[in-house]
Image (cartoon, rainbow, N blue to C red):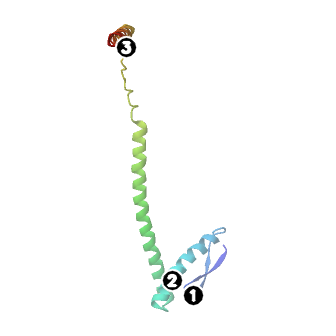
Amino acid sequence: MPDVKVSIGGREFEVACQVGEEHFLKSAAAMLDAEASVLSNQIGRMPESRMLLMAGLMLADKTAGIDEQLRGLEQKLSAQEQLIDELRNRPEPQSKTVEVAVIPPQVTETLAEIAARAEALAAAVEDKAS
């Protein structure tokens, strides 16, 4: 087991960890050091055990807040996944039938005949008027 030296609140500590976990230990120590630095700046010098306890409690409080946010996001995600499943599993909408009027050829022929008669009458009226 490798020993890693970490600095927390301006104090050096030697901590053992598993091989390959040195980076994680240093990262955790840096987080604890950040909280201890806040305490040192606000309160000043305090006993080592109290500093570590307070810094640990501050990190635990942050972690609890993040856990609460995570639970809320997991609930939202679950609701969204349920909605997606409902949308995927709903039946396909039925196609709507649209009826388009079809004009029979007889009507078209009759309208053409009426138009021709109207033009002939208009021409006859013009001839009489002139």
* In this view, 37 is above or below 121: below
Please tell me which of labels 3 and 1 falls first in the chain.
1
* In this view, 97 is above or below 89: above
Mark 3 vs mark 1: in front? 3
| Residue of label 2 | 36
Q: Quadrant of residue 124?
A: top left
The quadrant of the picture occupied by the C terminus is top left
| Residue of label 1 | 10
Tags 1 and 2 touching, CB below 8 Å? yes
Amino acid type of the residue that numbered disc 1 sits on in the rendered structure: Gly
The quadrant of the picture occupied by the N terminus is bottom right
**Residue at the spot x=39%, y=40% of the render?**
86
Amino acid type of the residue that numbered disc 2 sits on in the rendered structure: Ala
Please tell me which of labels 3 and 2 falls first in the chain.
2
Percent x, y for residue 8?
56, 83
Q: Gap between marks 3 and 1, in whole Å?
A: 94 Å
* In this view, 16 is above or below 124: below
Amino acid type of the residue that numbered disc 3 sits on in the rendered structure: Ile
| Residue of label 3 | 103
Q: Quadrant of residue 26?
A: bottom right
Residue at the far front: name it.
130
* In this view, 92 is above or below 11: above
